[in-house]
Amino acid sequence: MLLELMSNGKLAQLPPDNKPDGIAMPDEPSIMLLLPHNKYLLGTDGRWIYASSRPDEQPQGVCLYEDQVLSLLNEGTQPTIIPADTVNILRRELLSLSEPPGHHEAAVSMLRTFMKDHPAFIDEKIFLDEETFSRFAKTDPTLYKAYWTLRFSLARSELETAGRLKAWLKADPKNFENPRHVSKIWFSLLNLPDDDAVRELIENFSFSALEIKRISDQQASPLVVYNPLSGWLIVGQFGRKRDTLFRAWLYLNHELYHELRDRRNMSVHDIIQAVWGEHETRQAMTERANYKGAEKF
């Protein structure tokens, strides 16, 4: 894709043959942004370089951060400024051309340990071959979500996700899709979650500010509080034994809590893990949608 940075900071797409002389487009899928002073920004395979059409100037690696302005220095002239919203567009366009991170074999090998009865794992030739496995995943939203959640987490060395996915499967992911079932999760580094979470607990779920403050002051974990007007609030602490790193705050309405606790006989700890796992699968689906070949369910 060939783009040009306009004077107002917006992008204009150009035909590929409008590329200036002296600039070579790579063979692999890429984003090239033409800039003032004979400079350009080139993105390939998730990486960006800032370069010039002049052969005597060496290209430099640059990083594009979400929601941050990019300032590119030019010798003897004013820097080229790319606004944050334009940076976001560039990042999104390059990701859409890129393969998602992570390794297929590592993800399916671990996923098989707690989805071994799924047809996709009956034959090793099926699940080890990424193309063949993907055909199964594209017809099964649960398998698709579990696979990509695990693959992304392993790429970030977040091994604890596997346990949360196992609890999520035990809870039956369809329970989180049921419109009669409501759950929310927030995280806090301090005693209380952020102001938006507290406001939602008060305004939407009928917990009082004083009640939330009392809950935050307690050190028991997990802590379960019942509100007859709305449902259940569960608070779990995670981290070192004497130095808790953070808390997870969960809200479940009556129907979902009854389904998980009574019908599925899940412990409170497993309920925390399952709701947290649901949260992570949603995040993974948002992340997966940014990359090449995403499915929509």
Image (spheres, helix red, strand yellow):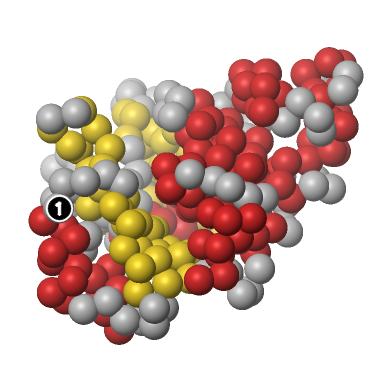
Determine which quarter of the picture holds residue 202: bottom left
Q: Is residue 164 above or below residue 131?
A: below
Determine which quarter of the picture holds residue 41: top left
Q: Is residue 45 above or below residue 192?
A: above
Determine which quarter of the picture holds residue 48: top left
Residue 177 visible in the picture: yes
Q: Where is residue 181 in the image (x, y as percent from the top left)?
A: 58, 69
Q: Which residue is drawn at 64% across and 55% down?
A: 263
Which SS class for mark 1?
loop
Give the left or right position of residue 115, taking residue 189 as reference: right
Local crowd size for mark 1, using a 10 Å CA cut-off: few (<14), some (14–19), many (≥20)? few
Question: Would you name the residue on which mark 1 appears?
Answer: 218
Q: Where is residue 20 in the image (x, y as percent from the top left)?
A: 52, 45
Q: Position of residue 189 (x, y in %)?
A: 18, 47
Q: Residue at x 60, y 60 (%)?
A: 259
Q: Residue at x 50, y 38 (%)?
A: 164
What is the quadrant of the C terminus in the image?
bottom right
Give the left or right position of residue 283, taking residue 9 as reference: right
Q: Is residue 78 above or below residue 166?
A: below
Q: Position of residue 272 (x, y in %)?
A: 43, 48
Q: Nearer the viewer, residue 151 or 48?
A: 151
Q: Nearer the viewer, residue 253 or 195?
A: 253
Q: What residue type is labelled 1?
A: Gln
Residue 12 visible in the picture: no
Q: Residue at x 39, y 78 (%)?
A: 228
